[in-house]
Image (cartoon, helix red, strand yellow):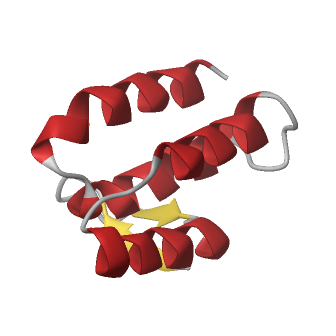
Amino acid sequence: MKINAVNGTNQPAFQKVNQKYLKWAEKLYKERRNITTEWYESLRDDVTLFKDISSKDGVDTMNAVRKYVTEPSMKFFNHVMDCIKRA
């Protein structure tokens, strides 16, 4: 678990990044230089349909992989992020 300070306060922000999806995104980035729609759909379904991952953890995971998203894919990334936030 990674702990970050929030806005200069002394209280840490706890982030739970799903390691399965993080490792999968890293692998995809090494192979294709981008994340596939299959990855997005799988994470979205685990958060919104199956509730295997909490919405907060889904958002943390999306934020962690943002660096692997290419500019043309950012619109779809934001769409999936909105779906996860509303879950």
Looking at the image, residue 32 sits to the left or right of residue 70; the answer is right
Relative height, residue 61 to residue 24 (above, below): above
Which percent across, then down, holds residue 10? Answer: 31, 66
Q: Tag count in the figure?
A: 0
Residue visible at 17% across and 51% down? Answer: 70
Taking depth in this image into account, of 22 and 9 the one nearest to the observer is 22
Residue visible at 58% across and 47% down? Answer: 38
Residue visible at 45% across and 80% down? Answer: 27
Relative height, residue 61 to residue 17 (above, below): above
Question: What quarter of the picture does the N terminus occupy?
Answer: bottom right
Classify residue 65 by image quadrant: bottom left
Which percent across, then down, holds residue 46? Answer: 76, 43
Looking at the image, residue 77 sits to the left or right of residue 60; the answer is left
Question: What quarter of the picture does the C terminus occupy?
Answer: top right
Residue visible at 82% across and 29% down? Answer: 49
Which percent across, then down, holds residue 25? Answer: 45, 68
Taking depth in this image into account, of 61 and 38 the one nearest to the observer is 38
For this orientation, the residue located farthest to the front is: 32
Relative height, residue 58 to residue 14 (above, below): above
Taking depth in this image into account, of 1 and 72 the one nearest to the observer is 72
Which percent across, then down, holds residue 47? Answer: 72, 38
Looking at the image, residue 16 sits to the left or right of residue 31; the answer is right
